[in-house]
Image (tube, rainbow, N blue to C red):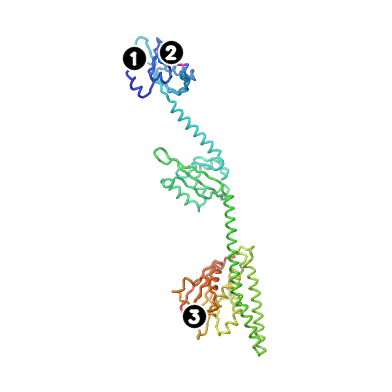
Amino acid sequence: MQTYLALYEKVTTLAHLGLWERNLNTGEIYWNQVAQEIYETEADFQPTLDKTFAFYVDREALKFLFEKTIETGNPESGEFQLRTFTGRLKWVKLRMQMEAKAGNDAIIYGSIKDISDQRHLLDTLAEREQQFHHAFDFAPIGMALVSLTGAWIRVNRMLCEMLGYEMKDFLNKTFQDITYPDDLDLDLSQMNMLLEGKIPAYSMEKRYYRIDKQVIWVLLSVTLVRDQQNVPLYFVSQIKDINERKNMELERDKALEIIQTQNGRLLNFAHIVSHNLRSHAANIQMITSMIGEEEDLAEQENLISLLGVNALNLQETLEHLNEVVDVGSDGAENQKTLNLLNEINKVKNVLLPSLQQVNAKLVIQVAPEIVIATDQAYLESILLNLLTNSIKYRKPNRNLQINVLAKLEKNKLVLKIKDNGLGIDLGVNGSKIFGMYNTFHGNKDARGIGLFLVKNQVEGMRGTISVKSKPAVGTTFEIVLPINEKD
């Protein structure tokens, strides 16, 4: 039975398209060569309607489609699974059309195409999609699909539990809405680099706001899904809760900072002991010697009184040093609200014998109402070092004058100590002036510790120190300290 199907035999072979035809009056069936290959029949196989239906797993569904085509006369199609003559399972796509011929003759014809590979691919993709969604929904970390504008497309239960939101709540927000402000710019910057193709993915530690407004640390890892034309579609975000670990790190860093602070305080303690207590000891020794040489009883009593003042100052200094090395302190506990003028006068009393010995004049221009919350041991050490240096490095053949001035400027104390001594050539020594073991005047007893110690103590009080000096003219140190650190 040769029909017009023969005209398409060569083309259908190239397309691997099986063609078939059944005469509804005679029951004859025709398959082309490709159809025979799809069914994997032998060359002498004679197809019938029953034999054909017998190949199909769901015979009733095929029979229904066949009868529907005959009844309506409309073209129909469907996908079916069959078992070939050799026993292999295949998926095929059937198309069929009814055609009435002249004289009550009618045929139904169509095509059959092996779509096993396509179905296998679709099944594989569906399986992978199912696996992805299963892994997504039940992942032990937070997972989210995020739009290119930052809207949450889909989130898993772990992310909901982590941040306390219901799934529907996420759909009304963007990731920008719940990101801690300080972390947003870096996240957006990385996201833009990912969109521009500059990086394949990115990870960062960031903070989110939970629904209860608590801040939580997470490790965010982001990749970008693109279509076949490389057009960005959406982001895939993995979000791991690292809040406990991050808090431990912050506690560790805080502990290390305390240790470093205490180490610095211990170092200052060592320097104060070795450097500043010498002033007290020298003054006591000097006064003791002067008492032994003085014949005037009234002057002896005056010196004995001065000796008592120095002994009291020494005792206070030792008490302050105990506070410096209190390892249980975080620094703020060592701060005391001090009257600046009183502290300067205490140091003046310590240095009074030295000032008198060189006929020096100490002018104090400090308002009696100025108070400052700071470390008493540090303040005493700074004053003692700078005033001692002025005495030590005075200019010969010129009466020494030291001016101590203080004023308040915008919640800061500006303290200046000015002398008319030897001065320092800052052009030569400016970069070294606060360095350890640097000396500038060749004194045999100079150790180069004082100014190094002063700078570290000023910075320990969260202040700054600067210097102006000219050789043979004098030196001015300016210290700026916050006055409300205790508040």
Q: Secondary structure at mark 2?
A: loop
**Is 51 inside the magenta-drawn segment?**
yes
Kind of residue indicated by mark 3: Leu
Q: Quadrant of the N terminus?
A: top left
Expressed as whole percent of the image width and height from the top left, the position of residue 400 reads 52, 83
Q: Is the C-beta separation of discs 2 and 3 under 8 Å?
A: no
State the CA–CA distance, disc 3 to disc 1.
124 Å
Expressed as whole percent of the image width and height from the top left, the position of residue 74 reads 40, 19
Left or right, 104 with respect to 263, comes to left
Numbered tag placed on residue 326 in the rendering: none
Give the extent of the magenta segment.
44-53
Sequence-first tag of 2 and 3: 2
From what the image shows, is residue 334 above or below residue 385?
above
> Which residue is the site of mark 2?
48
Kind of residue indicated by mark 2: Thr
> Which residue is the site of mark 1?
3
> Which residue is the site of mark 3?
422
Q: Residue at x 60, y 81 (%)?
A: 352
Determine crowd level at label 1: few under 14, some 14-19, many 20+ residues with C-alpha closer than 10 A: few
Expressed as whole percent of the image width and height from the top left, the position of residue 137 reads 54, 38
**Farthest residue toward the bottom?**
295
